[in-house]
Image (cartoon, rainbow, N blue to C red):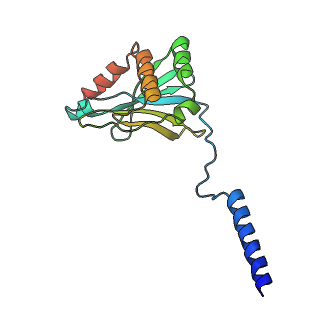
Amino acid sequence: MTKILNIFLTITILLTLAGCSQTQNPATTQAPIRFSNNILLSINNGTAGDGTIAECTDATIIIYKDRTVKVHMHVKDFPEIGSVMLSEEDYNAIAELASPEEIAGYQVTDGEGCDGSSYYISLYDENDKEAIIKGGYMAVGEEFGATYRAIHEILAKYEIKEIVNKYRATM
């Protein structure tokens, strides 16, 4: 009887160990994201930390791989309020700042304080749906911050702020 119990116990332990080392829980396993063939990334325009509703309403700047940049306002129905075309040089500069895989790996936390702004970079999946959002309220992360600022620096020469401010004036 002891021999049978020992065999049963050994088999149970072996099956348990083998099962744990080779089985993945499908509920917690994510397939790798296939990034969009159309959208490079989007970045929020940034807003005042306080002020009127219009001043605090943000916009999303979506950069497409054909160099088109579309600006959408964060109001009902998320309307496109304008667009610009990046030069090939500026598009390439943004694309070379960081790959989608690098951006997806950024470690970002929310900063401390109040009356600040939110900063986001979003990546899109193969269906052009927002799949990964990096950033947050007063986002803190060295790589994230450097990339966010560099993208905005490149975009500053385009009339994106004017497009946003013109729309805000109608609010």
Q: Is residue 171 visible?
A: no
**Quarter placement of the C terminus:** top left
Return the residue nearer the eye: 141 or 48.
141
Whether residue 59 sits left or right of residue 48 in the image: it is: right
Q: Is residue 16 above or below residue 149?
A: below
Residue 7 location (% of width, % of height): 79, 77
* Location of residue 141 in the rendering, given as x and y in whole percent from the top left corner: 42, 31
Identified at 76% across, 72% down, the residue is 11
Where, by quadrant of the figure, is residue 157 drawn?
A: top left
Residue sitting nearer the eye, 21 or 30: 21
Q: Which of the 4 quarters of the picture holds residue 22?
A: bottom right
Of 69 and 147, the residue lying toward us: 147
Is residue 69 among the parts visible in the rendering? yes
- Is 51 on the left or on the right of 9, as rendered? left
Residue 32 image point, x, y percent: 63, 43
* Most distant residue in the front direction: 2
Quadrant in which the N terminus appears: bottom right
The foreground one among 17 and 56 is 17
Against 143, residue 14 (above or below) is below
In this view, 24 is above or below 115: below
Q: Residue at x 41, y 15 (%)?
A: 158
Q: Position of residue 63 (x, y in %)?
A: 50, 26
- Determine whether, in the image, residue 140 is placed left or right of residue 28: left
